[in-house]
Amino acid sequence: MSTQKKAYIETYGCQMNISDTELMHGILAAEGYAATEKPEDADVILVNTCAIREHAEQRVLGRVGQLQQFRRGRPDVVIGVTGCMAQRLGADLLDRAGGVDLVMGPDAYRQLPEKLAALRHPAPALPVLGGATAAGGLTVLTFDPFENYEGVEARRTSGASAWVPIQRGCNYRCTYCIVPYVRGDEKNRAPEAILDEVHRLVADGVVEVTLLGQTVNSYEHDGWDFPRLLRAVARVPGIRRVRFTSPHPNGFTRELVAAMAEEPTVCKQLHLPVQSGHDRTLKRMLRRYTVQAYLEKIAWVREAMPEIALSTDVIVGFPGETEKEYHATLELMRTVRFDDAYLYKYSLRDGTPATRLPRKQFVPDDVAQTRLVKLIETHREIQAQINRSELGRTLEVLVEKEAKRGGLLGRTEGNKVVAFAGASTLIGHFATVRLTGTTGATFSGERVEDQPVQRVA
């Protein structure tokens, strides 16, 4: 019977959190922990969290309570909360989520093995670097201005695709956003380290990489800017697809558009958060661009890459948003016609500047919800029209996994998901698929062989 320790990590939130989970699994693997997908088998159960919206935090608190069941008869099981919510709430989590042993922020993951060992074998006067003990648990919440996890071997979850963090933290201070306060200031990795990682990934069979950063296009390091880095990654032999997320409109330049258009391995797909369609709201959000400037950048992109697939983020119900300003956002959605969009109702985050706005400016929850519902309806109508117009096209997809209802799921260059029939041996490989149907957000297709991939002129 194996006595190897096992770790289970459940992930909430953005792509950076997914990447951080791979990082933590890699750190734990170096100390002899095997990853498991079953919390009932784990010696260590971690919930890697998001702090962007209150709803996400409430889900985590409920989930931590559910995970206590896996301790029955196994009192040595350690349960921890990591990530942005852990950094935001700190020791309060030990009181709010009963049964939590460890609360650890995003800059402290190298200390995971050490802290787990301390929890298993507590000393009477245990020194805790950058943390504290409280309510029977341990908090580790220090910010490290130089921590980019160089030298850590992440445990990847996909053989064909990989997240490659190039930046941690954020120097913007959007008034609604908690990220700078839970992830710290921007830290950019050395380009040589990034390129070395991409070369190693290719050697391991990876064909698609996504460059990650909170504002990925603000990347700068020793004379390198983001367009230069993107071109260098795109030219690594063996790479077939390169993506990046998420850029900030304020630093989205013509040089970046040129790199996207001219490098054949850079996917013709762009996620460019807009957040609002009205200048007054954008100014109050401290977004640092106007609607006209945003639309100008969209025009650059579409002129250089007519086939580009666009997606965005939008927040409705920001304090002070009027009906006129909200309708300007609807109009922007109709003007740009995004292929996909992530749409949210404003969520107050303690510690962010927006919480200090006068309470009379806060939009009532029922009004904000009505606005969100209409925004979602508007987007889905546009998305369905766009996707129906693509039926009949023959596209190359990277096959990612088996579909829950049978068959396979693949992703197009435009980041659209296609379900089609095929053998599991195709997972991790490219297949040519004809789009035959759409449910609005995803496609169904049929595999075709010896057919050319079609691109929009």
Image (tube, rainbow, N blue to C red):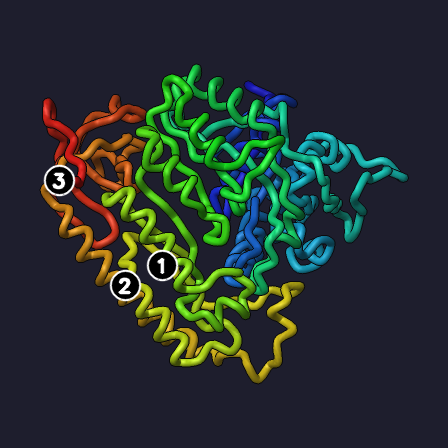
Badge 2 is on which residue?
335
Q: Of the two numbered discs 1 and 3 on the same chain, state the one appearing first in sequence.
A: 1
Secondary structure at badge 2 equals helix
Q: Nearer the viewer, mark 1 or mark 3?
A: 1
Q: Give the quadrant of the C terminus.
A: top left
Residue 99 in the image: state x and y as whole percent.
66, 50
Q: Mark 3 to mark 2: distance in Å?
A: 24 Å
Residue 419: which disc?
none
Badge 3 is on which residue?
393
Q: Name the residue at 45% across, 64% down.
A: 290
Badge 1 is on which residue?
295
Badge 2 amino acid: Thr
> Mark 3 near mark 2, Cβ–Cβ under 8 Å?
no
Q: Residues within 10 Å of mark 3 (few under 14, many from 20)?
A: some
> Mark 1 near mark 3, Cβ–Cβ under 8 Å?
no
Q: Residues within 10 Å of mark 1 (few under 14, many from 20)?
A: some
Q: Name the residue at 55% across, 51% down.
A: 50
Q: What is the residue that sits farthest to the bottom in this orientation?
A: 360
> Mark 1 near mark 2, Cβ–Cβ under 8 Å?
yes
